Amino acid sequence: MKRMLLKLLTFLSVASLLVSHSQSAVSSVDLGSEWLKVAVVNLKPGQSPISIAINEMSKRKSPALVAFHESTRLLGEEASGIIARYPHRVYSQLRDMIGKPFKQVKHLIDSLYLPFNVVEDSRGAVSFKIDENNNFSVEELLAMVLSYAVNLVDTHAKLAVKDFVISVPPYFGQAERKGLMQAAELAGMNVLSLVNEHSGAALQYGIDKDFSNESRHVVFYDMGATTTYAALVYFSAYNAKVYGKTVSVNQFQVKDVRWDAELGGQNMELRLVEYFADEFNKQVGNGVDVRKSPKAMAKLKKQVKRTKEILSANTMAPISVESLYVDIDFRSSITRQKFEELCEDLWERSLVPLREVLNYSGLKMDEIYAVELIGGGTRVPKLQAKLQEYLGRTELDRHLDADEAIVLGASLLAANLSDGIKLNRKLGMVDGSSYGFVVELDGPELQKDESTRQLLAPRMKKLPSKMFRSIIHAKDFEVSLAYESEDLLPPGATSPVFAKYAVSGLAEASEKYSSRNLSSPIKANLHFSLSRSGVLSLDRADAVIEITEWVEVPKKNLIVENVASSSPNISAETAAQNMTVEANENLQSESGTSSASNSTAEELSASNSSAEEPSKTELLTEKRLKKRTFRVPLKIVEKTVGPGASLSKEALVDAEAKLEELDKKDADRRRTAELKNNLEGYIYATKEKFETSEDYEKVSTSEERQSFVEKLDEAQEWLYTDGEDATAKEFQERLDVLKAIGDPVFFRFKELTARPASVEHAQKYLGQLQQIVNDWETNKPWLPKDRTDEVLFLI
């Protein structure tokens, strides 16, 4: 009841925040290790403005799974349905594999008893071997999961939605974020932004509150399936002018976030899996190890999830698995106390992110307004007790939906970033980068010092941001982007360097301008951006050359009338004395300088030619020292290699072709299933009609019915024998043949059943007409009687 009330209040509060008459829609995806949730912002009349898209099983969250079975791709709930029988064909945990090196992914797979056939690709990342002919990268498999989310959105919104915001855990580094963006691109998504999960939760928390009278510090503590983090967020308000009026605008700033990327509810489940596996091995004996059977472990893990959920509400939970191993059933039970003992070390680890974020903040415990719990793992009673004990509080704050807070908050960001939907109430968001970044330069004649390794963005740098760095150099060089500290790297990262670029064209520009009078050493300007999604990139580079040279310019305030000879008061010496140094003049390219010089030359030529005409005036010139700046664009080529490298353009094209082919097969499969269901439904419905209604005997002969029933029986037999592997075209042809026989019968039946009502309606109408005509004798006496009788005769 409390959960339903919370969802109702959320809906009512959010509904009042949106204003737009556009038919556009945007969406958000909360992509987890095991599940995904999708929210849709759609202002279409008759629909709630922000809602969770349900799947084909009417569930609000869907398994983040993709499977391949008998040449068929299965997604979401369909894939979940075969995981216990074919665990080696159902791919999970894909979010946690993106951007990771092969060894890291192999360790993850082995620790979770996932029987995947994986190989190392050319980047050093993992590739999944589906069969002898097909391998898929993590980006491709994740794109399939995201395409499933897109289909949920389109079905829910009843229109094609392209704009999305996707939530990511705060520890995601550059490789993970870029890989996810590529996967979304392959899925046909236009990603407005990635958003850190804690920022999505903060948006949902603050959108309907007023901070004008009180600012507050709130900690968001999230334990999901595989990760745990704590984020400190400061909520406040500021005054702004809106249409001439002063209004209070809410805002929040993420102050800090700390995490444990290898701690979550899954760790607790694995402790139960190991416990029950040992118990089963003891029961069976004979050296049996259930861990060596992928099917058995898949069944056991599935039941353990339910057992853990039961323990959150009860002090004891049973577990029952039929035919766990070689047709041997397994039944047991466990108490909550035993479960807590198995996970004893995990409870202390769960406090570390919270302890760190509070220690680094310098805030006292009573300065924290609330500690909001999100994520399914926070439902475990022992974890809640440990948090209460550490915080010194009798109750924890659970004002947000633990499962849906992030996706709903992300949908608000999607609405704010879209062009067609706007928020009535504003909530300013200042998020920060989870990592600090440095830039390193390397090349000929570049000595390693402070100038070649510079801090580019400190940790918690505002998103988005632009950065600029300059280096005095005259040769081509390389740029490396790296994490600031080797002590704080994304999970699985083996090196702080995550991107490399080759910058060329500087040597050529230096050689070209070296003969000119350089006023300062040649330098290269580098322009970086840290996007709203938290992705750092080198956007452009320019060579900056400053030269000083003498140029002739028109002399100010001195015009001389030409006569037979030049004035004796004007001489070359005088001109030389009047030479001055002019301020900087920035030019984008040498061609701009050339045109300026040519223009000056043309003016001088015009002056010289005018000197030959005695009746015209002469514009005298003088030499001035000018400083000119040339900016030459430099070529940037990305040279990133390793697991963190993005898919190449060729690989992307190949991936798009493979996914398009799979999408076509899925569409054909759905069409085939639909037509098969139509044929099956038509056969059963028709037989039932003939068996339950005697009226069909009135509109058809016994021979017609007998022949039709025989055709139906024949089609039904074919449907369950040869028709099992039939194509959509064959199902349609069979249905058309049956309808050609049945439609005339059903048409006559429709006429038969509709005739009494139609006759009654006609008789009633004729009676009304007759009454009207009879009234003409009184109401319209001028009408001839013979004409009136003629009308009555027709009626």
Image (cartoon, rainbow, N blue to C red):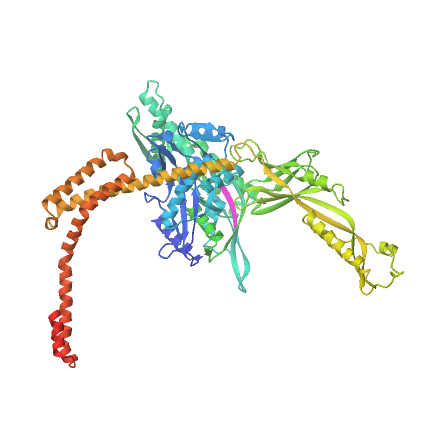
The answer to whether 35 appears left or right of 545 in the picture is: left
- Left of 322 or right of it: where is 36? right
Please identify the dominant SS of the magenta region. Answer: strand
Determine if the magenta segment contains residue 156: no
Q: On screen, 687 above or below 83?
A: below
Q: Which residues are magenta?
A: 229-234
Give how far across and how far down residue 299 sits, in percent. 33, 30
Seen from this angle, which residue lies furthest top?
286
User: Closer to the camera, 145 or 463?
Assistant: 145
Residue 5 on image: x %, y %: 36, 51
Which sits in the foreground, 670 or 37? Answer: 670
Q: Is residue 122 above or below residue 593?
A: above
Seen from this angle, which residue lies furthest front? Answer: 613
Q: What residue is rendered at 46% in x and 50% in y?
A: 414
Q: At 32% across and 45% down in the image, what residue appears? A: 58
Q: Is residue 572 visible?
A: yes
